[in-house]
Image (cartoon, coloured by chain):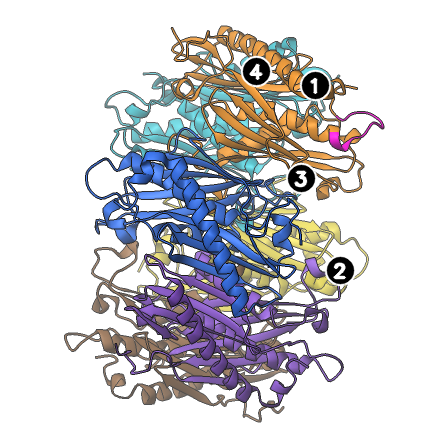
Chain colours: A brown, B yellow, C cyan, D orange, E blue, F purple
Amino acid sequence: MKRNDGRANKELRPVKMTRDFVIYPEGSVLIEMGSTRVLCNASVEEKVPRFLAGKGKGWVTAEYSLLPRSTHQRNSREAAKGKQTGRTQEIQRLIGRALRSVVDLEALGEKSITVDCDVLQADGGTRTASITGAFVALAIALDKVCKDEGKFPLKDFLAAISVGIVDGDEMLDLCYEEDSRAEVDMNIVMTGGGSYVELQGTGEEHTFDKKQLKKMVGLGEKGCSRLIEIQKEVLGKISERVGK
Amino acid sequence: MKRNDGRANKELRPVKMTRDFVIYPEGSVLIEMGSTRVLCNASVEEKVPRFLAGKGKGWVTAEYSLLPRSTHQRNSREAAKGKQTGRTQEIQRLIGRALRSVVDLEALGEKSITVDCDVLQADGGTRTASITGAFVALAIALDKVCKDEGKFPLKDFLAAISVGIVDGDEMLDLCYEEDSRAEVDMNIVMTGGGSYVELQGTGEEHTFDKKQLKKMVGLGEKGCSRLIEIQKEVLGKISERVGK
Amino acid sequence: MKRNDGRANKELRPVKMTRDFVIYPEGSVLIEMGSTRVLCNASVEEKVPRFLAGKGKGWVTAEYSLLPRSTHQRNSREAAKGKQTGRTQEIQRLIGRALRSVVDLEALGEKSITVDCDVLQADGGTRTASITGAFVALAIALDKVCKDEGKFPLKDFLAAISVGIVDGDEMLDLCYEEDSRAEVDMNIVMTGGGSYVELQGTGEEHTFDKKQLKKMVGLGEKGCSRLIEIQKEVLGKISERVGK
Amino acid sequence: MKRNDGRANKELRPVKMTRDFVIYPEGSVLIEMGSTRVLCNASVEEKVPRFLAGKGKGWVTAEYSLLPRSTHQRNSREAAKGKQTGRTQEIQRLIGRALRSVVDLEALGEKSITVDCDVLQADGGTRTASITGAFVALAIALDKVCKDEGKFPLKDFLAAISVGIVDGDEMLDLCYEEDSRAEVDMNIVMTGGGSYVELQGTGEEHTFDKKQLKKMVGLGEKGCSRLIEIQKEVLGKISERVGK
Amino acid sequence: MKRNDGRANKELRPVKMTRDFVIYPEGSVLIEMGSTRVLCNASVEEKVPRFLAGKGKGWVTAEYSLLPRSTHQRNSREAAKGKQTGRTQEIQRLIGRALRSVVDLEALGEKSITVDCDVLQADGGTRTASITGAFVALAIALDKVCKDEGKFPLKDFLAAISVGIVDGDEMLDLCYEEDSRAEVDMNIVMTGGGSYVELQGTGEEHTFDKKQLKKMVGLGEKGCSRLIEIQKEVLGKISERVGK
Amino acid sequence: MKRNDGRANKELRPVKMTRDFVIYPEGSVLIEMGSTRVLCNASVEEKVPRFLAGKGKGWVTAEYSLLPRSTHQRNSREAAKGKQTGRTQEIQRLIGRALRSVVDLEALGEKSITVDCDVLQADGGTRTASITGAFVALAIALDKVCKDEGKFPLKDFLAAISVGIVDGDEMLDLCYEEDSRAEVDMNIVMTGGGSYVELQGTGEEHTFDKKQLKKMVGLGEKGCSRLIEIQKEVLGKISERVGK
């Protein structure tokens, strides 16, 4: 079974992260995985949500959106419809939760960081690309606002990738065309230390067994570990502060 | 480490399903797992959503809600706030997706089934109890509307359970108190045939490794398989139609 | 003219109130009047709405909802539609107003009580059953939070019932089938002392005269007075605090 | 006990109805009762709501609004807040229901009439003034669109008035200052034939007994009957078509 | 080319401003320009929006609405639809901006003034009539709340008028019928000193050249200057405080 | 008076238009004017809005949005707030109206084109950059969907620019810093033929006179004419179809 861009089943698409794509945010990264392009902008505010007021802790959250024509067919603008879809809310909750798993909120102190993940072009894997890119934007922003004193609020690296079963074969990093005919779709979020943060496998109209689960998890581990290498290159000296 | 109700780590809470709790729906079940109580009502309509019009297929969907005082502290009513939270939308998408994995939508024909899962009392595991109870309500409704002719639209049984890591130990079927201090929380949805339908593991502010993943999945399998036995008892003769 | 359950025109349906149906609220009652079942949960908060801040007075309010399949045909979920219907708002305003008529808000002090009335099964008379049940839930909650010191904040008992004219006959406590073909529909809310709190008579597409008004009011008085006897039995010792 | 404008307790405020206040509607009336001024515009459309499609019947409905500065203190604009208050919805449901009680919807045929009641200046009794004025606007509109053929769709006249108990005295047609310190507030809607259409008595923080009810109903009857005389004068020849 | 009411191209429609049309607002004016009638009510509050808190400055803002049947065809009520149209928002932003151009916000001090412009009858030019009437309502309100001490917060007079090109001719103060077939539509807002405050020219499906622009601006200047004369008559002695 | 990037008052910022920035839309252009960057994507659908059904005409509309961190301070996401601001609606109405002025809707036929203008980075002049970029995206899309047969639906070129008065000097193409301290702000939309399409001058808290108006219009004309030259270069052969 050949993939339509000739990749091996265990291969990522070409990955590129461009720093400072937008000039205003504390951290800004355009991540590209094949034709998928997500703009990740991290904004820092010197205040916390009400439920954290006075606790000496910070907060990290994410918002996600598809530009109307980031997809093959135009999808209508959520601001015009007056509400975010369930899918959007589910994805932005996932991104925020994943980021918080590697942030030391006490070390961050009373700051809020919002990472906006706006998909400019969608070709599958936008939620995992968002997590991988958002981590880099977050690291850049934290490097800017957390000067030398004390502990750096990032405990570890974080990356995410999709895996799936297409025509019976386990594959890494599905593009849109593969994703839309996949029997099973799984998103894996991992740390630099090789632990799982989030693992979401879904078989709409199909199911999967233990062996397939194991194979998918194995592919995902390799993918995340490769993405973290690339994050380190992009972050350069900042990457040395992570976990310190 | 003892659990606060004295259960073993691999043990379910007492499970009870009451049929026909409400008299109007085509299928109605009150499921209780310990103190968690969810009312699952399946409603059948002789029409399909627009995107399925004229395709000869049916649709199954779910809605989920917490009654305002089903929880320790009153949470405000979504209808009064004018929108459903991201959590609610995420859960109802999960329930619908899980149910559809065991429904033969062609065999169902041009009908829509909505399963309302309204939580009367919440003590952890409401989304998995909803799936387990919704399956039974769905089976009763289908038994009522699909008379002898042809294939029964349910391909297999379906149940769901939560597992987690609390104070370093893997445990089955977490109650609220355990859930709120769990390091890792995982929901597992399985079929009667022992396949996975959905597997969602999350470690907010913690992570988990391969060994822990394996242990949790093992516990979940046993839990789902026990729940399916109970479903069969509750469904009685209807359970013989499943998969036929 | 026989009623379809054989009752006399001046007879109530069987009434049952189950205390502590849900374990978390300060006061919880499931009221059943025939097939109508409403879950009434009273929640106490140690704060008041802004317009009462610093006045040393409390507040009592109510929310009302039909579960989607509490009715013969499924009605769509208000949280999903993003707003409460006019009917819902009218009913919850009525319940709150009625409850406040027997509460001494100064004696209550700076507390807010919200009584949620969620209809599990609807067979006519849900708004009056809500008032009758909400009063009991409120009394239980007040008994819990108002310890011996001082005046008990309930000045009197409170119950409500529907009356109507069906096929020319005045009848007490209409079920859904009677209600939907009634020429006139009236809701009466009364205190233990026999005064009127609210009286709402409506003749959509019909009208009524002075004699009919008098007859309906007479039936309603007897109904309310019987309901208050039942409330006293359910409340037991708590009922002795009312009016003290 | 003197009223602050010197009226007797059984006396209406000065009533004035100006026809054709706005030039576009099929029926337009500005009703003034003392300082209360409501603009009632009836609009006819040659279509019916979906639930009446193909039944050969028409529909009559009403909308109600307070201009932001029709009141002593400015109240915020409902369009800006994005929703109508419960009070607004309750009032417009009442107006619509009351109007429909005197309309023969079959004789109307497949038309919809919306009567907009916009309060320009509010000094108590806006909902009853709306009903009384809306009836006249409706009659003018029906006279315009229902040419000689067949039955005129208005079966009877319709008027409404408020009564209340202020400082222990029953009074007719309360102004704002009286209304805001009333112990009991009642709205009465009656036909030209002297039947009740709607009767809503409310005693927030007070109650009322049978004698008081009787007195209030008596005052209301006289008030409605005087208002219907005025409607006849305003309608002139149109009033002869009512009930024919 | 004759205009349908016989006016010359450079002529305004009959203008009338009625003070104190509503009794509660600090300033109330009904402005009529031909058949266009707008009720302008200015409300003063002793507080400022959050972004101005503690700056010692005041704020002036406007809201605009068409009554549902102020137009030839009924347009649906924005409060019922749950949101204001883009057109409404654009117009109320324009009115507020225009008013603020002649208000000395420091001299006003920490007060907010909201001018509600509710169109009772619309025959073209409602936004410019709103500005012209709102200025007068504002002046009356300021005269009431700014007693002799210090500077009067109005720096200059303000009026607005529409001009357009209809069938190739430049015309002043278009009525609805002219507006709807105009090739170019321009709104001009000017001060008593003859300066421009806002100038908005639009040629949907048409364009205009420099000569036409000049002619339209010339007509608009004359119209505004005539309107300011009328404002002075209506304001009487208050007009002497403007600019002092 | 020097501008902070050393430009002359009559000079545009560096302009760049990148075609096919996103691969899915029928027409896609990234326009950059200095640091302002707007992504303009034109989407074609083979249907028209209801009000045009069956008239043989097409429709062109626009949507506009600022990415949350396209600005110096993060502004909250409109989809999360559940509605578009008045500013957004005003801008997208302007863009749509401007585009339609050069489109022959009959020649377009029953198609709808939506141009999404999403601001990636905002440094002043986003609405005029949107118009200039949207025209190019529209031309590319029309070239793709309107094959050789018949009239090309674009009647002329279209560009827009801002002008303003800053510290008393008229200037072309204001950046954010200039715009925020400008006394007067004017947006000019012109065709290739040198006619005005839209002219919006605003002097919040300032006014302007006839001489200043003339100077601003003169600067704007030169700016638009230079932008149209650049559009022609970017469009290449497509530009020859315009007006044919």
Both on one chain, marks 2 and 1?
Answer: no
- Report the front residue among B68 and C204: C204
> Please, what is the dominant secondary structure of the magenta stretch?
loop
Mark nearest the camera among 1 and 3 is: 1
Up-down: is D8 above or below A190?
Answer: above
Return the residue at label 3: C72
Asked if the magenta segment contains residue C152, the reply would be no
What residue type is disc 2 on? Gly
Disc 3 on helix, strand or loop? loop
Q: Which residue is mark 4?
A: C220
Inter-mark Cα distance, 3 to 4: 27 Å
Label 2: which secondary element: loop
Q: On the rendered image, what quadrant is the N terminus of chain A found in? A: bottom right
- The magenta segment: D144-153
Chain ID at mark 3:
C
Q: Which of pointers 1 and 4 indicates the residue nearer the eye?
A: 1
Q: Between residue D67 and residue C118, name the one nearer to us.
A: D67
Q: Kindly indicate whether the residues beneath marks 1 and 3 are on one polypeptide chain.
A: no
